[in-house]
Image: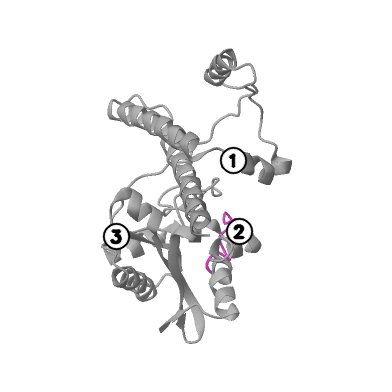
Amino acid sequence: MEIKLVKSGKDLKDFIKLPWKIYKNDRFWVPPLISEVKFVLNQHKNPFWKHAQGEYFIAKKEGKVVGRIAALIDHLHVNHRKEKCGFFGFFESTNDYDVAELLLSTAKMYLKENGMEIMRGPMNPSINEECGTLIDGFDYPPFLLMTHNPPYYKELLERFGLLKAVDWYAYLGPIPSQLPKEIEIASQFAKSKNSNFVVRPIDLQNLAVEAEKVREMTAADLEARVKELRMELMKLRFQKATNQLKNPLKKRELRKDIARALTIIKEKQNEGQRTAKS
């Protein structure tokens, strides 16, 4: 058995296509769009890699690909959290501990050689994408942004010495025909303060234009928004501590919003530095 660093187009194709072998008999697995996976892994096109680094590896046994893994370092996370924590992601393996051990050891070594002291995962490649390992609910199709994997992954990861850090849940719920009352109240309050204020649905047909409008916010606006989101997150943590939290997924949504805002702030700072140098 050998471990190979992904370098060539053939290696990358093997890395991307492995899940089709792992899940060929899993009727609940939903194949990803290959073009989307290529974009996520493309370190020249995906904005995530502007503040991150990583390598991809495939494991081969008797000439056949039997596993894959990515070793990832998100410098934005390291600097923001003040912890030397790296991640592994895109983990796939046959039901063979030797394969899993080789993959995880390789990722661990990469992170250690690059100054990291903690390894968490799977992150594919960050908390803003699919992450975690499914440990219950294998008789359902995967939910949005929730991973799907064979039941034996839990045993492989725990045997290596990894421990569960947090539980993430997905819920089935009805979609309301009208906006929640809280949103309507917030909208009316905002309109009373500014007659030009408008609340409308996102135009999914022009998503790039909509995203650019968010990026047009100044760094000060974004930093103020981050403070608001953190205050709201603090309230949710208090609700959880007092068993009053009704929607646990709200915390994850807030963390994702904070991460997005911080990413844009960092990009604006880098743009400002490049402008100053030029």
Q: Which residue is labeled 3 in the image?
A: 162
Which of the numbered marks, if any, corresponds to residue 216? 1
The earlier-in-sequence mark between 2 and 1 is 2
Residue at x 54%, y 49% (from the top left corner)? 142
The earlier-in-sequence mark between 3 and 1 is 3
Residue at x 62%, y 43% (from the top left corner)? 211
The answer to the question of whether label 2 and label 1 lie on touching residues, with beta carbons closer than 8 A, is no
33 left or right, relative to 268: right
90 left or right, relative to 99: right
Whole-percent x, y for residue 109 in the image? 31, 73
Residue at x 60%, y 65% (from the top left corner)? 38
The earlier-in-sequence mark between 2 and 3 is 2
- Amino acid at dot 2: Pro
**Of the residues tagged 2 and 1, which is closer to the observer?**
1
Which of the numbered marks, if any, corresponds to residue 32? 2
Work out which quarter of the rendered image holds the N terminus and state it. bottom left
Which of the numbered marks, if any, corresponds to residue 235? none
Residue 93 visible = no
Q: Count residues near mark 1 (Cα–Cα under 10 Å), then give few for <14, some for 14-19, many for 20+.
A: few
Please provide the residue range marked out in magenta.
21-30
Whole-percent x, y for residue 245 in the image? 37, 27
Magenta span contains residue 20:
no
The answer to which image quadrant residue 195 occupies is: top right
